[in-house]
Structure formats: structure tokens, C-alpha cells
Image (cartoon, rainbow, N blue to C red):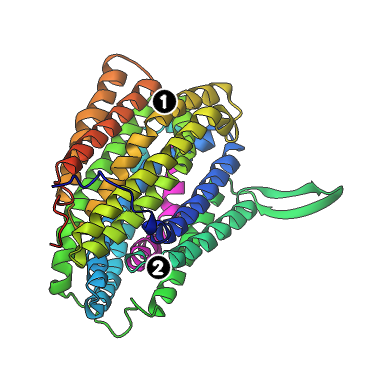
Amino acid sequence: MKNPLTGKLPWHMLPTIFSLALPTMLEQMMQTAVQYVDIAMIGTLGTQATAAVGSTSTVNWLLNSTISAIGIGFLAYISQAAGAEDTVRVKKASGQAVLAVLVVGSFFTLLTLSLSGRVPVWMQVDPAIQELASQYFFILYTPMLFSTATIIFGTVLRAVGDTKTPMRVGILVNLLNVALNFLLIYPSRSVSCFGHSLWIYGCGWGVIGAAAASAVSYAFGGIYIFIVLMKHPVVSPRGQSVLPDWNVLRPCLRVSIPNGLQRFATSLGYVAFASMINSLGDIATAAHTIANTVESAFYIPGYGMQMAAATLIGNAFGARDTRRMQDLAKMIIALEVAMMIVSGGLLFLFAPNMMSLFSKDALVISLGATVLRMVAVSEPFYGVSIIIEGMMQGMGKTVIPLICNIAGMWGIRITGTFICIRMFSLGLISAWSCMILHNLMLFAVFVILCLKGKIIPREQSAR
């Protein structure tokens, strides 16, 4: 029996893989570019403004990743149904996705708004900026229902191979966010353009203006993607019931619940991780926030290929085509490693330059560049684990990632960071070292499982 990760690469699958991966990459590139613009704009207001925005950013990961887990349940169900050419199941699942958006979005809206005053305290934000961070958090999460719609409906569309529509929605949302940032963050001012003085109106709301710009953009995105979904020829929920259909929800929840527990537990770990870093002061918090933003751009190839892996492996799994699953796994992992070597190399070379785009503080730049160069070396390894996890998501195998991610997050990253910071009074570099060790553990475990045939069966014949 052949190992599923060895053998000749199936180059004929390249067009199919990139047709799914590239729109997702472009969408994430746009989102990252807007994050860069946001941090750069806020950075001009000072280190405290950057810290106020960044201090609660990990809570955003916690919420969005938990919602995304719901979407993964629908992705596995719909991609497998599409692979089996069962259009009835596809449309029923789309109707249930509408129900999920209404329930989950309403719940998280009430939760975030009611806790907005406490989150900065729990995150150990500097008392001088707690009120500002709380106001930013409240405004940002007012349109939580619409943000939930964007996440879940975008995943539903990707499950049937439509990655271009979420990309277009994401681009429009981000362009609107940038335009509103210019109007809401800064006061009215005169700027020089080609030798002429140009008067630009501005509200001068600072950090609050950045939150308002994002909130309006999220609301627009949720409404727009719902309209697009309703008109979609393959996966429109039009005419479908939004009452609970447990024949659809049960298999979705079997995937979503482990994935949701994983994302919640790991994201809660990010919150604990960030809380310990916040306790190191404004310099460490600002360097960590900016470095995270910079780093996200260099993970774009990984997460773009992960979505392609989840959709295509899910289709092949639904069609009971093990040979195609093996061929896809080999091709996508090989592409991922190549792209992440390139992105990691660029990050290592240009880390100081990237940091200087967002801060003029020499200490912030130096500290951020150091941790970025550390993580750049580990990028190819992390990229492999991203792809293997995406393959498992497409097949609905979410228990293994649950166990591995929770063990790595809390057993290595959080425990290690606590020991380094609280017991030995070490700084940000030690915390990022623990994070890298966690990522390497995931790589080792996932690769071993894959080589042993625990992810994709070794047999080459159809299941």
C-alpha cells in the first residue's frame, strides 16, 4: 500500500486548486491591506491609541473563530453533498445556515455589548486607556449579526466552489472601511496634492472613528452577501425553511461542535496569551499588535490553500473517491510548502521595514522585527499543519484537531508563556518562542498522522 503523501505530483489538478485558492487569497490580501491601513492610521495617533485598539483584538479572534466553526459544519455538509451531486441537501443546508446566522448573530450581539465594559479589565489593559478600549469594543461589535452573516454565508458559497463572490464582497467592505477611516478618524484638514491645496472634511473622532468605520462596513457586508446568496443559482436558500431541520443540523453540528470547542479553547488561549503580553506594558503590546498584523499578510497563501483543500477534499470524500483525495493532498501540500518558504523568506528579510510602516518608536520596531524574524523560520511548518487541518475539516474529521490544538495551546503556549513572564520575568521574545513551539508541535503530530494513513486512507481504490 502506498503512502498518501508520496508519489508523483498530479500537476493536472493545478487549475482546479488555484481557481479556488486564488480568490480566497485575494480576499485575504485585501483584508490584510485594510488592517495595515487601520493600524497605520491609528498609529499616527500615538502608541496608546495603537494599544487601545490592539489590546482587545484577540477577543475578535475568539468571536470570529467560534462563528467560523459553525460555518465549517456547513462547509463539510454542503461540499460533500455537492460532491455527491445532491442539490436537495445543498439547498436545505443553505436554509439552515440562515437560521444559524439569526441565532448565533443575535446571541453574540447581546453578549459582546453587555460585556464591553469588562473586557478591557479582563485583558489587563492599562487603566489609562481602558475606557477608550471599551468604547472601541462596543461600537465595533454593534453590527455582530451582520458580521456573522458575512462569515457563515461566505463559507456556504465557498463550499460549492464559489470563492469569487465572497472575495468581491470582502473587497467592497474593505474599500468602504478605508474610505470611512479617512473621513472619521482625522479632523478636517488641508493636504497638498500635485502642488495644489485640497480641503478634506473629517470628523476627528480618532479611535472611535476607526471603530465606527469598521461597524458600518460590517453591516454593509452582511446585507450585501445575504442578497447575493439569495440570488445564487446553486445554493440559494430561497423557498427553504428556516425552522430547525435536524436531519441537516445534526451532521453539521457533529463537525461544528468539536471545531467550535477547538476554536473557542484556542482563541481563549490567544486572549490569555495577549493578556499576559499586555501586562508587559505599552511597548510590548504595541509591538505584539503590529507584529501580528504584519505576520497575517504572510499567512495568506496558507489560508487560501486551506480553503481549497477543505472544499476539494470534501467533494472527493462525498464522491467516495480516495485516489482523488490522495492526489489532491500531495499537490496542495507541495504547493503550500513552496509558497510558505517564499513568504517566510520575505518576512525575515523585510521585518524591520514592515514594522516601521506602523510605528516610529524605535523600541517597538526593534522588538517587533525580532519576533517576526523568529516566526518567519517556522512558517513552512505551520503551513503544512494548516493544510492538513483543512483536509480534515472538509471530511468532517474535527475531533483530532480539537485534541491537538487544545493540548498545544494550553500545554505549550500558555503554560510556557506563564512560566516565562510571570515566574522568570522574561519578555515578548519568550512568549513568541512558546507560540512557535506550539506551531511546530502541530506540524509534527499532523504529519505523523498523515503518513500513517490516519487522515486519508492508504488504499488507492475507491472506498
Asked where in the image residue 414 lies, by quadrant, the reply is top left
Main SS of residues in magenta: helix
Q: Is residue 202 above or below residue 90?
A: above
Q: Is residue 80 left or right of residue 135?
A: left
Q: Is residue 220 magenta?
A: no
Which residue does the image show at 54% across and 26% down from the upper left? 365
Q: Amino acid at mark 1?
A: Met
| Residue 374 numbered mark, or none | 1
The residue that disc 2 covers is 162
- x, y percentage for residue 345? 48, 32
Which residue is rendered at x = 30% and y = 85% of the image? 239
Front one among 161 and 178: 161
Q: Is residue 143 above or below residue 84?
A: above
Q: Which residues are magenta?
A: 129-157
Element class at badge 2: loop
Q: Is 229 placed above or below 73 here?
A: below
Give the farthest residue toward the top: 424
